[in-house]
Image (tube, rainbow, N blue to C red):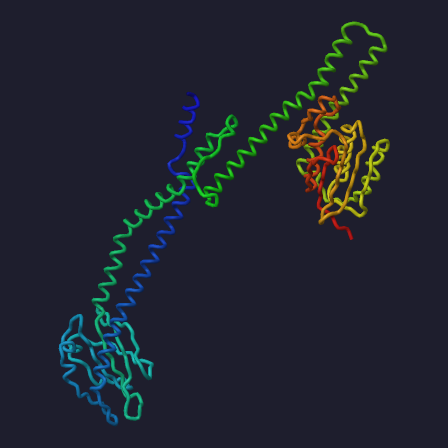
């Protein structure tokens, strides 16, 4: 009940719009608004271009109709097509009217249409052209005009005059004004629509993510075996998030189980000598003892203390190499470490060494020494009937491969996966009362991995166990 109330309070604390959602909504609003603004500017520009082109086509067609009506003889320009400029388009003022003016090259007015007299003066800007057409927008009083200029040539093909033809841009301006007003009137509604769409998209986009978060929140240390069940393609972002979280929970579950098992095993291993020490002390303190009894007790206490020190020392070494602090950049020679540090330790044992020369590794030479010592020590302990151990180190495919082989009872397939766990001891070692704490092989694997190597265990032929270690070789010139 308390858990349900706590969950309810947590849900109430959740804001309607989180910081991330607000940020996404803001970006969506900005982007949508810019798209809306850009599309409107583009629409207005295209509409302006189309309307202007329509006016220019109308002016061009009319100019091409008027030009044949002009005759230029010597320095005189005659207009023989009076019927053309007597049409209503040239005599009245309306949205479709034409305004015609002809100026010579000295800016003297030679001819204008009747409607100009009623309309008023239209500015003439002498064009800087020798052929073709020139279009421009001009203003006459309150009126806006679209104007075209074209040169007129004499018999020597020299420019003798300029024809100016104008039309009103009233309808054109009205259309453009309506488009602008329409967009301005719709702007508030468009903004509201953009805001609502942005909120909807943001909420819809994060809905699957919120579902995954809700599922993940229900996974705790008490039920780490639970997993996120969400249908999505493994390559999809949500599918990858699901798989990543599930893999994380799997690793956490494994680590927690290992920690729990480690705690139990460590407590057991440390409690054994502590209990022995406690029992011996209680026994010796019950009454006065002889000097010999006190000496025996001290010897036993010293042995149990050494046992605890050995366990704690091994755990500290495992922690040190697990953190990567001892990975090192040093390069050492394999044969030299074995010759100087390994052989003296096992001088009284039957060990056959086949170590190739010029083998170099990168890492901690002390760590490498611990690896070989532990493997040989295990091989000797488990080969009581035939304590012959072979150590071989060779270069193979840019790797240095080291084998440690014994002729002992071997390891079952079920236990081969467990022997590298902390405090794990095989059934045969417990049955035969072989001394040890189950930390040696865990320590070996930890140091091997810190040196970017790998280790595996196989059955030896015809009997026994073979440990195979592989390290990246270092080329020394």
x and y, in percent, of residue 460 in the image: 73, 35
| Image position, residue 432 (x, y; %) | 74, 22
Specify the quadrant that holds the N terminus.
Answer: top left
- Image: 77 above or below 385: below
Q: Nearer the viewer, residue 11 or 250?
A: 250
- Camera-side residue: 394 or 183? 394
Residue toward you, 90 or 218: 218
Q: Is residue 362 above or below residue 111?
A: above
* Rendered position, 300 above or below 402: above
**Residue 263, percent across and down?**
63, 24
Q: Is residue 258 left or right of residue 56?
A: right
**Left or right for 111, reference 228:** left
Q: Residue at x 30, y 77 (%)?
A: 134
Q: Residue at x 78, y 41 (%)?
A: 392
Q: Quadrant of residue 177?
A: bottom left
Q: Residue furthest top?
A: 287
Specify the quadrant of the image occupied by residue 382.
Answer: top right
Residue 176: give x, y in percent of width and height. 25, 63
Relative to residue 165, is residue 348 drawn left or right? Answer: right
């Amino acid at each position: 009940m308390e858990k349900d109330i706590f969950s309810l309070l947590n849900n109430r604390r959740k804001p309607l719009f989180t910081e991330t959602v607000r940020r996404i909504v803001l970006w969506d609003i900005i982007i949508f608004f810019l798209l809306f603004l850009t599309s409107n500017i583009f629409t207005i520009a295209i509409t302006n271009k189309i309307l202007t082109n329509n006016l220019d086509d109308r002016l061009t067609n009319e100019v091409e109709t008027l030009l044949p009506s002009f005759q230029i003889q010597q320095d005189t320009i005659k207009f023989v097509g009076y019927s053309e400029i007597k049409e209503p388009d040239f005599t009245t003022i309306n949205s479709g009217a034409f305004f015609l003016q002809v100026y010579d090259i000295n800016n003297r007015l030679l001819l204008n249409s009747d409607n100009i007299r009623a309309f008023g003066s239209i500015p003439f800007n002498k064009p800087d052209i020798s052929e073709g057409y020139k279009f421009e927008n001009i203003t006459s009083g309150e009126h806006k005009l679209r104007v075209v200029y074209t040169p007129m040539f004499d018999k020597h093909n020299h420019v003798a005059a300029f024809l100016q033809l104008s039309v009103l841009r009233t309808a054109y301006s009205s259309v453009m004004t309506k488009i602008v007003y329409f967009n301005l009137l719709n702007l508030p509604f468009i903004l509201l629509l953009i805001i609502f769409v942005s909120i909807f998209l943001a909420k819809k986009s994060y809905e699957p993510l919120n579902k995954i978060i809700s599922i993940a929140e229900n996974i705790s240390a008490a039920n780490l075996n639970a997993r996120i069940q969400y249908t999505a393609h493994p390559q999809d972002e949500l599918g990858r998030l699901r798989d990543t979280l599930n893999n994380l929970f799997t690793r956490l579950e494994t680590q927690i189980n290992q920690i729990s098992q480690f705690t139990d095993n460590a407590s057991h291993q440390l409690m054994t000598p502590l209990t022995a020490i406690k029992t011996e002390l209680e026994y010796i303190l019950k009454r006065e003892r002889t000097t010999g009894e006190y000496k025996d007790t001290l010897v036993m206490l010293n042995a149990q203390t050494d046992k605890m020190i050995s366990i704690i020392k091994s755990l500290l070494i495992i922690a040190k190499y697990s953190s990567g602090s001892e990975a090192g950049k040093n390069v050492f020679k394999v044969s030299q470490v074995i010759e100087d540090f390994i052989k003296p330790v096992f001088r009284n044992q039957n060990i056959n060494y086949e170590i190739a020369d010029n083998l170099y590794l990168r890492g901690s030479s002390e760590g490498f020494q611990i690896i070989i010592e532990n493997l040989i020590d295990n091989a000797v302990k488990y080969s009581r009937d035939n304590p012959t151990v072979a150590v071989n180190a060779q270069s193979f495919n840019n790797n240095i491969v080291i084998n440690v082989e014994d002729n002992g009872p071997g390891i079952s397939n079920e236990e081969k996966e467990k022997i590298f766990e902390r405090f794990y001891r095989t059934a045969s070692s417990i049955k035969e009362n072989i001394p040890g704490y189950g930390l040696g092989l865990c320590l070996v694997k930890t140091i091997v991995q810190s040196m970017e190597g790998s280790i595996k265990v196989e059955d030896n032929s015809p009997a026994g166990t073979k440990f195979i270690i592989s390290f990246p070789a270092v080329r020394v010139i």
